[in-house]
Image: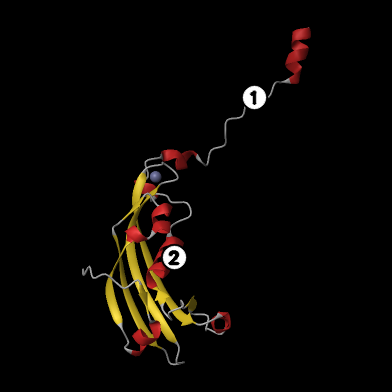
């Protein structure tokens, strides 16, 4: 696996004209939102990205990536490793109107003032989206047997029998 550092921002138009394909890494040390959302993370996010122009003449950025993070299981509170996989296709747009006209299979990404997109932010955002809302082990790996008792009703206290009172009166 190559550990070539990918550029943080890139000009999607120029890259698309060259049908650029690149594979490399982003360091997660620069991804504060990702780090805040998990216990810890692998040092790198491995990303493969392709730029191109489709048959409609639209520029696209297609990327696949993966990173391993440590999350806390919400069932047993033990930490566990979880692999995050991302796979997305974006098309750069200059404004909101252009974004609305995009075919639905593209997500819009706005260009910055230099006409570039921030690839690292994009990857971080996608990673955040695939972190489970309620992280949990696979059942077989989970330390907590609590799931097996979830189906049982809590034990009800016996209701006092009103006739007991009458018995006492006799
Ligand atoms: Zn667990």
Please indicate whether residue 2 sits to the left or right of residue 132 in the image.
left
Instruction: Tell me: residue 72, above or below residue 8.
Output: above
Residue 59, located in which quarter of the rendered image? bottom left
In the rendered structure, find residue 158 and report the number of the disc placed on it.
Answer: 1
> Percent position (x, y) of residue 75?
44, 43
Label 2 or label 1, whichever lies nearer to me, is 2
> Percent position (x, y) of residue 137?
39, 49
> Percent position (x, y) of residue 100?
57, 81
Residue at coordinates 57% horizontally, 33% vertically from top-left?
A: 154
Determine which residue is flagged by label 2. Answer: 125
For this orientation, the residue located farthest to the top is: 170
Instruction: Tell me: residue 100, above or below residue 149.
Output: below
Residue at coordinates 41% horizontally, 67% vertically from top-left?
A: 121
* Mark 2 residue's CB less than 8 Å from ligand 1: no
Instruction: Tell me: residue 64, above or below residue 145.
Output: below
For this rendering, which residue is in front, 124 or 84? 124
Residue at coordinates 26% horizontally, 69% vertically from top-left?
A: 5
- Mark 1 closeness class: few <14, some 14–19, many ≥20 residues within 10 Å: few
If you read the primary sequence from the N terminus, does the residue marked by circle 2 or circle 1 appear first?
Answer: 2
> Percent position (x, y) of residue 130?
43, 62
For this rendering, which residue is in front, 19 or 159? 19
Quarter of the picture containing the N terminus is bottom left
For this rendering, which residue is in front, 125 or 54? 125
């Amino acid at each position: 696996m190559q550990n070539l550092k990918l550029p943080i921002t890139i000009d999607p138009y120029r890259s698309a004209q060259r049908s650029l394909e690149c594979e490399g890494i982003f360091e997660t040390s620069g991804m504060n939102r990702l780090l805040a959302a998990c216990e810890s993370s692998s040092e790198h996010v491995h990303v493969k990205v392709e730029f191109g122009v489709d048959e409609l003449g639209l520029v696209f950025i297609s990327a696949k990536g993966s990173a391993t993070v440590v999350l806390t299981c919400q069932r047993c509170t033990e930490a566990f490793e979880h692999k995050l996989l991302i796979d997305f296709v974006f098309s750069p747009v200059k404004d909101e109107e252009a974004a609305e006209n995009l075919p639905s299979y593209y997500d819009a990404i706005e260009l910055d003032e230099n006409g570039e997109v921030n690839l690292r932010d994009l990857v971080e955002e996608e990673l955040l989206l695939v972190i489970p809302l309620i992280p949990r082990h696979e059942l077989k790996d989970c330390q907590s047997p609590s799931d097996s008792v979830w189906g049982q009703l809590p034990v009800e206290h016996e209701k006092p029998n009103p006739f007991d009172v009458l018995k006492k009166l006799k």
